[in-house]
Amino acid sequence: MSRPYLRPLLVWVLGAAALAAAVLLCFLLAPFLGGPGAFWAVAPGYIRGTASAFGIRRSLEGWDTLPEPIRSGARSAVFIGNHASLFDPPLLISTLPSRPVFIAKKELARVPFLGWVIALARFIFIDRSRSEAARRSLRDAARRLHEGQSLAAFPEGTRSPDGSLLPFKKGVFALAFKAGVPVVPLAIHGGLEVLPRGTWRVRGGPYRIRVGAPLEAAAFPDAEALREAAEAALRGLLDPDNPGSDMVVCDTNGSMPRNLTT
């Protein structure tokens, strides 16, 4: 199937102008709400509107099955997802009801507007090309977990070119194991179809996030066993022959309406 040209071109152009305005609004609100507060007040709505303009239909399945302390943010957790699309981080930001701190690659810090607002949100940049800088970032992430904040990361470390799950890197699992917090797998269905690596021509369609059961760090002998279990769990959630049950569909104004049965 061919990819559209005109619609994504128009949305990218108008979206860039809207991004500049959204970032400005974040900085104007930051003195009153704090950097992260300003980010979460503005960014999800901007992302939902842009996704809708592209024709992306977001849905979230299984969130209500998580323990309430994880859903409410009263207990920290590490959310991990597969990564096939440039849109995965922003669509998670706009769809997850909680507000985890994302771990982002250092290169994003240099992107005008986008890097500025990520820094304002106090997300964690990690530079894998410099071991000492990467260790500092991981220490920061560990501190956030101990302070009660949840993290979100893509443990493949890069986007999959064909949607197949790449081997997981161990960093976030070492963090979760040491902190004694659960790992929550998020299977993203539709990212590759919406915007695969190597193109800017977004094709609208469903973007489904399926939430798996939390993996308690204390149930595993070490971080490597936790990593292996998380990878296996995510592979299972990505299996099209393993359907989900309850789906909560997020609309574009950010409310969480009715439960739907798949």
Image: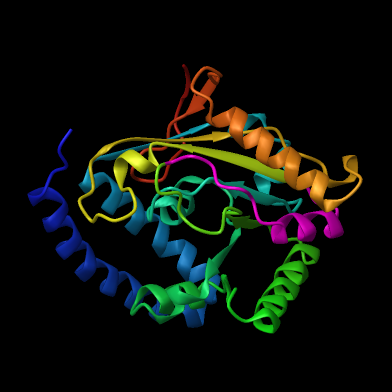
Q: 255 left or right of 71?
A: left
Residue 130 seen anywhere in this rendered image of the structure: yes
The image position of residue 258, as x and y in percent, is 46, 25
Which range is magenta? 163-182
Residue 95 in the magenta stretch? The answer is no
Name which residue lies at 74% across and 42% down: 228
The answer to which quarter of the image holds residue 21 is bottom left
Camera sees residue 33: no
Location of residue 103 in the rendering, given as x and y in whole percent from the top left corner: 58, 65
Hey, which quadrant is residue 157 in on the image? bottom right
Which residue: 73% across, 36% down?
A: 67
Which of the two residues, 130 or 11, is positioned nearer the viewer here?
A: 130
Horizontal arrangement in the rendering, residue 121 relative to residue 233 (left or right): left
Q: Would you place residue 102 above or below residue 28 in this image?
A: above
Residue 78, horizontal then vertical, whole percent: 69, 52
Q: Residue at x 70, y 58 (%)?
A: 172
Instruction: Please tell me whether residue 24 is drawn above or below residue 95 in the rendered image.
Output: below
* Quarter of the figure with the N terminus: top left
Q: Nearer the viewer, residue 15 or 239?
A: 239
Q: Is residue 217 left or right of 230 when viewed as pictured?
A: right
Colour scheme in the image? rainbow
Q: Nearer the viewer, residue 21 or 56?
A: 56
